[in-house]
Image: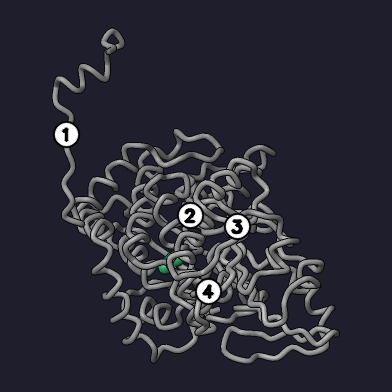
Amino acid sequence: MANYDIKDPRLAEGGRLRIEWAEREMPVLRQIKERFAKERPLQGIRVSACLHVTTETANLMKTLHAGGADVVLVASNPLSTQDDVASSLVNHDEIPTFAIKGEDNVVYYKHIHAALDHKPHFTMDDGADLVSTMHKDRRDCLDTIIGGTEETTTGVIRLRAMAADKALMFPVMAVNDALTKHFFDNRYGTGQSTIDGIVRATNVLLAGKVFVVAGYGWCGRGLAMRARGMGSNVIVTEIDPMKALEAVMDGFRVMPMAEAAKIGDIFCTVTGDINVIDRHHFEAMKSGAIVANSGHFNVEINIPALAEMSTKVRLVRPFVQEYTLKDGRVIHILGEGRLINLASAEGHPASVMDMSFANQALGLEYMVKNAGKLEKTVYSVPAEIDNEIARLKLKAMGVDIDVLTEEQVKYLNSWEEGT
Ligand code: ADE
């Protein structure tokens, strides 16, 4: 394969304009890029990145490139690529990119292998497909690999399972663990972009609809909050008693999916687990129900079961498949059950990706500096990096905060003073 695989080179100019537009909202990453251009902390380092190919990711790739890294980028999901961005990276930034929106699984894995053919010193994953493929099928890459970073909850869960099995062969930094990542990206990013994806795909009015959110992790919290803000009557489903309790006290109705299935108008899964919406749930749903997923993999909705139950499937709008069941009811699946915020919209807005990708850039720099000292396990982003990103973000937003007085520091460090 040539050293890129993109849909259409003529899309490059439009991609460049959108990448520049995103950069305006990424002041923290921009500052890192300026420093990297001077200091070149990644000089000669080969990086293979498997991320959603968006305008925000393009700005991260340009930052690593400015730092001296030799970067290759491939898609981390078959349906999340922005083809104009891939084109611009290849044509304007000399960053080999292998990503085509709508690529099938065979092409998706061909692209993953192209990233591994780069013989990376570091991987940068979103969902752990690079690391997992390397460990299963491309152990030739283990000779040169030094470490990796991982963007998302699902990927971190996979990596921690590998580390627990003693299967992980190099250190990986869990970017998702950083507070400046999951507090903001998972909550406000997923909240806004998932609503955006559902609305762009369907153009349905959310006000007055019963909106079922499966999962009340950071992503579910953000989505439930924003769906309520649009006037939906929100139901949360959970398996964790603590999260369920939190959802109740946040003012949501909580019930099992079997009950919610009967009354929901719109469903969205954000759990990270499989078959959260299953055959018996489809059996209970109202005709016309809309079902989407915003979790990392397309396994949360049992679409094969729905297909078996159906007599007809047709695409009624881009990203909307209408399944007609044997009893005449119809159910709409959005974006083939892939993460709807990236399939039919543009993913999280740049302002939150600014912090997530600042963690990626600084996490990678940290791993390069500490190469050889780290164990074959999963590390969290050091608190100093996390706090520095929060400080820089506040500064860029023009927000000042108070500083403890000496008296207050003393009080906080003493135990004698009471009432
Ligand atoms: N994940 C969610 N939104 C994203 C975005 N805009 N860019 C890259 N990865 C993302």
Q: Are marks 1 and 2 in contact (CB under 8 Å)?
A: no
Asked if one can make out residue 162 in the rendered structure from this viewpoint, the answer is no
The mark that comes first in sequence, 4 or 1, is: 4
Closer to the camera, 81 or 248?
248
Q: Quadrant of residue 412?
A: top left
Total labels drawn: 4
Q: What residue type is labelled 2?
A: Glu
Q: Determine if the C-beta at disc 2 is less than 8 A from ligand 1.
A: yes
The mark that comes first in sequence, 4 or 3, is: 4
Q: What residue type is labelled 1?
A: Val
Q: In this view, does 412 lie above or below 187?
A: above
Residue drawn at 77 percent across, 66 percent down: 278
CA distance separating discs 2 and 3: 25 Å
Crowding near the residue tagged with mark 3, few <14, some 14–19, many ≥20 C-alpha atoms within 10 Å: many
Residue drawn at 67 percent across, 82 percent down: 288
Query: Which is more foreground, mark 4 or mark 1?
Result: 4
The mark that comes first in sequence, 3 or 1, is: 3
Residue 256: which numbered mark, if any? Answer: none
Q: Determine if the C-beta at disc 4 is less than 8 A from ligand 1.
A: no
Mark 4: which secondary structure? loop
Q: Mark 4 points at which residue?
A: 208
Q: Mark 2 points at which residue?
A: 151
The mark that comes first in sequence, 2 or 3, is: 2
Q: Name the residue under label 1.
A: 403
Q: Are marks 3 and 1 in contact (CB under 8 Å)?
A: no
Residue 236: which numbered mark, if any? Answer: 3
Mark 2: which secondary structure? loop
* Quadrant where the N terminus is found in the figure: bottom right
Q: Determine if the C-beta at disc 1 is less than 8 A from ligand 1.
A: no
Residue 133 percent coordinates (x, y)? 64, 58
